[in-house]
Image: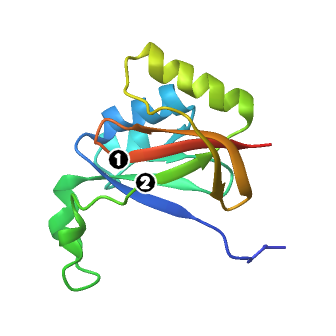
Amino acid sequence: MTDNTARLDHVVLWVRDPLTSVGFYEKTLGMEPLRVTEFAAGTVPFPSVRLNEETIFDLMPLTMAPRMTMLPDAADSSGHPVNHVCLSLPEGDFDALRGRLEDQGAPVSDFSYDSYGARGMARRSFYFTDPDGNIFEARYYV
């Protein structure tokens, strides 16, 4: 039986180099790469990475912007960033992610404490960017 309750399916991120982005999301965030071989072979237009069983990030090459014709001016979304995407992690994964980012010399923000989100108050959070400047927040709930 299919559960058809509302949930986030995917987020599309504009990226300059999808394969570099796949590497970042796989090595730094531990996400599972999807359709990388097919993308490299030219049989699919973009690769993806899996956040969890239900949610993926599509890594859309900026070169695809002219093909975004589903709505008037949709191509203009290229380079127009979302403010940020927030990832909720278990505390150990949260600490491990921050450590990997710091080991790579990636800029990270100071910690925020007790910030509100989809599951109530998150104990700690911080912000970082991917190689294309997309901003992410990482947080954990108690």
| Image quadrant in which you'd find residue 129 | top left
Residue in the image at 69% along x and 41% along y: 140
| Image quadrant in which you'd find residue 6 | bottom right
Which percent across, then down, holds residue 35?
45, 46
For label 2, count other residues whose C-alpha is less than 10 Å away and answer few (under 14), some (14-19) or many (20+).
Answer: few
| Image quadrant in which you'd find residue 21 | top left
Q: Is residue 35 left or right of residue 50?
A: left
Label 2 is placed on what type of residue? His
Which percent across, then down, holds residue 108?
43, 30
Residue in the image at 57% along x and 31% along y: 30
In the image, 123 versus 66, the foreground residue is 123
Residue in the image at 40% along x and 59% along y: 12
Circle 2 is placed at which residue position? 84
Circle 1 is placed at which residue position? 134
Residue in the image at 35% along x and 47% along y: 134
Q: Is residue 12 left or right of residue 64?
A: right
Label 1 is placed on what type of residue? Asn
Q: Are the two marked residues, 1 and 2, in contact with CB atoms closer than 8 angstroms?
A: yes
For label 1, count other residues whose C-alpha is less than 10 Å away and answer few (under 14), some (14-19) or many (20+).
Answer: some
Q: Secondary structure at mark 2?
A: loop
Which percent across, then down, holds residue 100?
51, 20
